[in-house]
């Protein structure tokens, strides 16, 4: 795949995730988008759960990895260290999203090791992205071409962190989780537009 081809990876990841969540949500009897977490669609014991895990987590995560890799490859060898760390953390966030699909929940035992791995992958995805946003902002202070990406990343990371840790106080956890995903989807849509040209 050429570098130019990666520009559609972000929108493709968003489309894949939305179609999977909406489509599998409609198919699962009794599933309520307002009350049930996204991860339930891919849980062990849920009809077509394994297929959702691949289409709703693994595929979007791999596509997001292309977006992150594109950013890394555009960084010159002289890029500030925080900027390079930010790119690496974007890759880690994408891998953590993939891991959510590889380690699905178990509806029969929400506290078992498989479910704990899934929860850990979700937390790693969130923390890695937030760390990436901070590192990009620090690096962009010495590389002005990266300021648009840094600003977008920091805004989305702040929204995601608030959704994950604050919004659930005033709304159902399932809705707060979806708002966190929304922040990441917005980043995926905007990243290709604000990435600087390859040095």
Image (spheres, grey):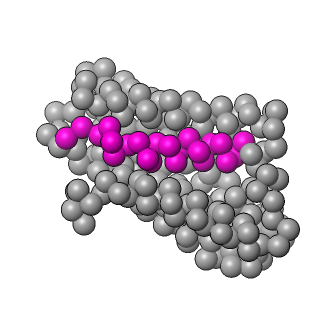
Q: Is residue 39 above or below residue 160?
A: below
Residue, far left: 199
Is residue 198 at all visible to an observer of this figure?
A: yes
At horizontal 43% and vertical 60% (from top left) the residue drawn is 12
- Residues 1 and 114: in front is 1
Q: Which residues are magenta?
A: 176-197
What is the quadrant of residue 89 in the picture? top left
Residue 109: give x, y in percent of width and height: 83, 67
Examine the rendered structure and indicate whether residue 94 appears above or below residue 194. below
Q: Where is the C terminus found, in terms of image quarters?
A: top left
- Residue 149 on image: x %, y %: 36, 34
- Percent across and percent down for residue 30 are 85, 68
- Please give the name of the residue rendered at 46% of the width and 42% of the height, measured from the top-left corner: 187
* Residue at image location 81% in from the left, 33% down from the top: 169
Query: How many numbered discs?
Result: 0
Q: Left or right: where does residue 100 sit relative to residue 128?
A: right
Quarter of the image for residue 97 reads bottom right
User: In the image, 134: left or right of 18?
Assistant: left
**94 and 63: which is toward the camera:** 63
Between 32 and 116, which is closer to the camera in this rendering?
A: 32
Which residue lies most toward the bottom here?
47
Residue drawn where x is 81% and y is 65% of the image = 31
Magenta span: chief secondary structure: helix
Left or right placement of residue 99 versus residue 152 in this view? right
Q: Is residue 136 magenta?
A: no
Q: Quadrant of the N terminus?
A: bottom left
Q: Is residue 66 visible?
A: no
Please state the horizontal and vertical placement of residue 58, each as a whole percent of the image: 52, 66
Would you place residue 102 above or below residue 73 in this image?
Answer: below
């Amino acid at each position: 795949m050429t570098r130019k081809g990666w520009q559609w990876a972000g929108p493709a990841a968003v489309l894949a995730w939305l179609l999977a969540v909406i489509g599998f949500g409609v198919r699962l009897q009794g599933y309520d988008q307002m009350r049930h977490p996204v991860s339930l669609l891919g849980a062990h014991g849920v009809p077509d759960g394994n297929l959702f895990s691949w289409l709703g987590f693994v595929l979007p995560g791999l596509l997001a990895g292309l977006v992150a890799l594109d950013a890394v490859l555009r960084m010159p060898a002289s890029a500030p260290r925080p900027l390079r760390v930010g790119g690496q953390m974007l890759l880690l966030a994408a891998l953590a999203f993939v891991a959510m699909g590889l380690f699905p929940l178990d509806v029969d035992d929400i506290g078992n090791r498989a479910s704990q791995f899934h929860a850990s992958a979700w937390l790693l995805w969130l923390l890695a992205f937030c760390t990436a946003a901070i590192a990009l902002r620090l690096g962009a202070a010495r590389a002005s071409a990266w300021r648009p990406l840094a600003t977008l990343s920091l805004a989305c990371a702040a929204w995601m962190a608030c959704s994950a840790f604050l919004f659930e106080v005033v709304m159902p956890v399932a809705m707060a989780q979806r708002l966190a995903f929304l922040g990441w989807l917005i980043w995926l849509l905007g990243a290709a537009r604000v990435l600087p040209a390859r040095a």
